[in-house]
Amino acid sequence: MRKPEWLKSNKLGAKKTSVITGYLRSYKLNSVCESAQCPNKGECFERGTATFMILGDVCTRNCTFCAIKKSEFDLLPPNPDEPKSIAELTDKLNLKYVVITTVTRDDLPDGGAEQMAKTVTELKALGKEDVAVEVLISDLQGNLSALKTILDSNPDVLNHNIETINRLYSEVRPKANYNTSLKILKTAKEINPDILTKSGFMVGLGETFNEVTTLMNDLRNSGVDILTIGQYMQPSVKHYNVREYVHPDVFKKYETIAKEIGFILVESGPLVRSSYHAEKAKDFLKHRS
């Protein structure tokens, strides 16, 4: 399917991207900005935001939309130096908003929760009050003890992406469960009512308008504060086919509905990805403090 004009990303931040990519290599760190082929990485880098991906670059899930490498074998154990390296690079680059995400590691008993918590702890140990930390977690296979481990490290925002409507899970996320994702988000809010929770999903996979509004209501009823909605773009011919390129006007309608049902911050547009304009959450963190 031919991409429409509105899906052309800008080239903002090309120089900054080159600099940060070089540092990632020297510190032996991964960024989901590269692994997931994000169209906005230059813009985010220019804004002082970066998304680090911990626990390697190989995922144990088989989601059909995702560009990240997949395998259940020969996975590396958590790198003990990784949390401190991320903190050091954050300090060096003077980042103001850091997102820590992870490949899904179903091979680890806690899904990688301890490594995530250690990374947040190292970032908080920098002692910089103007640096906010968002964690973008997997569903942890519904392990609520692992979730509490992450929350106990005191991240500012907890994000878990629902990705798509319930009906499409068997095709798009065959190893995941819609209700498990909702439970993780709802429980995070129950454990820590003051934390900002966040989720996001893609459109253009074959969902209907009513199914999208149902999904938004399910997320809001699970206590989610912040929402991101973006266009699915097929990484290769082997991935799930794009069913529709959703017009920007429809994204605006979704944004209006999302705000009406109570989300405090909504990013909705064709090129929006989970960490797009993530630093806007800092305004609500200040308000809460």
Image (cartoon, helix red, strand yellow):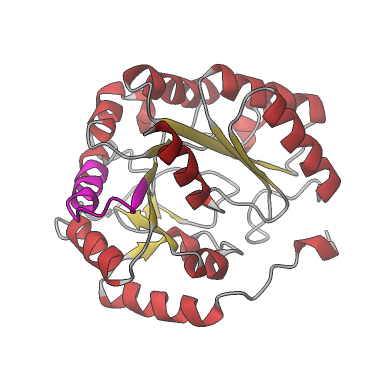
Looking at the image, residue 120 lies above or below residue 83: above
Residue 112: name its quadrant: top left
Question: Is 41 placed left or right of 29 in the picture?
Answer: right
Residue drawn at (47%, 78%) of the image? 16
Q: Position of residue 275 (x, y in %)?
A: 51, 51
Q: Position of residue 280 (x, y in %)?
A: 52, 48
Q: Is residue 94 visible?
A: yes
Residue 221: name its quadrant: top right
131 or 176, nearer to the observer: 131
Residue drawn at (75%, 29%) of the image? 257
Q: Quadrant of the C terminus?
A: top left
Question: Is 258 placed left or right of 80 in the picture?
Answer: right
Looking at the image, residue 256 lies above or below residue 246: above
Asked if residue 128 lies in the magenta stretch, the reply is: yes
Total count of labels: 0
Q: Quadrant of the N terminus?
A: bottom right
Asked if residue 167 lies in the magenta stretch, the reply is: no
Q: Is residue 159 visible?
A: no
Q: Position of residue 34 (x, y in %)?
A: 48, 66
Question: Is 102 placed left or right of 262 in the picture?
Answer: left
Residue drawn at (45%, 45%) of the image? 282
Residue drawn at (48%, 44%) of the image? 283
Q: Position of residue 69 (x, y in %)?
A: 45, 57
Question: Is 245 placed left or right of 231 in the picture?
Answer: right
Magenta stretch, residue numbers: 116-133
132 or 187, nearer to the observer: 132
Looking at the image, residue 286 lies above or below residue 277: above
Furthest toward the left, the residue is 80
